Image (cartoon, grey):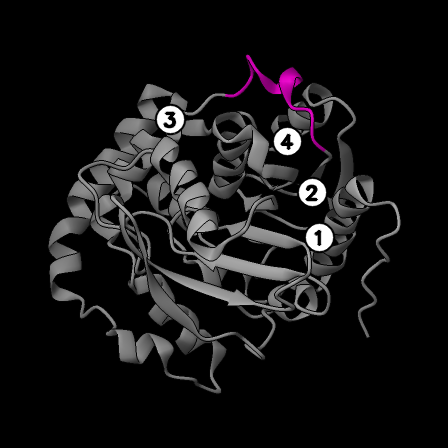
Amino acid sequence: MSAAVLDRISRGLSLPGPSYLPVRDLPSGTMVELPGRGSTFVTDSGPADAPAIILQHSVMTTGLLCWYPVIPELNQRYRVITLDHRWHGRGIRSGAFDLLDCADDVAALADVLGIGRFVTAGFSMGGGISQLVWRRHHDRVAGLVLCSTGPYFSTRDPHLREQANKTGRLLKPVYRIIPRPSDATLDKPTSHTALWGMRQFLSTPLSHTGDFGEGLGRFDSREWLAEIDVPTSVVVSVRDKVVEPERQQLLVDGIPGARRFDVDGGHACCVLGADKFVPEFLDAVDAVVRAGDPDSPRIVVP
């Protein structure tokens, strides 16, 4: 495996590192059956009657691994839902990986939970999923918060897509010998955040890297960005080398009325550098909710 491929993988993963926040006050989750689709791991926390926000995670992470730093703060005033997307963590095991299916899973989960309209927030891959949730389930989406993402992904480039496929093939024998964490282990609390994060990371089959690259490569929202008609915040990671800031800016320029929020961090800033990401993300969520309900107060984080 080339150094370039390893570098791309390492920069793209939201794994805990030296500056991560400790895991605290995370909700417990459960497997939820989506009729006709399959079962996935879901957390549902915060005031049941508060505005709902469904969080879409980045590639090669899980709902909790990507979003654990923001959940306790969001829970102060929002109903917060996470799910593991297909082939990630304890997500649905399907024949193929496609962001369209992931978007439809989000709407199906909202149905099961009895949620009519919701804000969808997505980080990187999750930003593409969130855009597709609006595209395919327009009447359900009250607003968008798009973080470290763009209207397309780098694996639209056939060369990069082939690299992802090659990486997946090389990782298949490795994945067979790496013990996958059990559900009990994944749910087991630990005082060591890095250990918890590694368990979450290893719950996603590394051998599906190529499938993820193919799924991301098929996404392109540039032709319909101007049709998005809900309040939208774009959280830009200004030192991002995976989804460069210029590509993130295409969302700001293309979505009518979109507001930009800057984070001084790279592509893993939701975890690595969460101290800078969390306040901007909360402001971005508040801006979207207030646009739909001007009387909604701002979250105050101690």
- The percent position of residue 152, horizontal first and vertical second, equals 50, 25
Lower position in the chain sequence, tag 4 or tag 2: 2
Q: Nearer the viewer, residue 160 or 109?
A: 109
Q: Amino acid at mark 1?
A: Phe
Which residue lies under the disc numbered 2?
A: 235
- The percent position of residue 276, horizontal first and vertical second, equals 73, 59
- The percent position of residue 202, horizontal first and vertical second, equals 30, 64
Callout 3–callout 1 Cβ contact below 8 Å: no
- Residue 281 got which mark? 1
Q: Is residue 127 above or below residue 205?
A: above
Lower position in the chain sequence, tag 4 or tag 3: 3
Q: Amino acid at mark 2?
A: Val
Q: What residue lies at 48% left-to-right and 49% top-to-bottom?
A: 110
Q: Which residues are magenta?
A: 221-230
Residue 92 appears in the rendering: yes
Which residue lies under the disc numbered 4?
A: 248
Label 1, label 2: how far apart the Cα atoms are: 7 Å
- Residue 217 got which mark? 3
Graded by Cα atoms within 10 Å as few (under 14), some (14 to 19) or many (20 or more), the crowding at tag 2 reads many
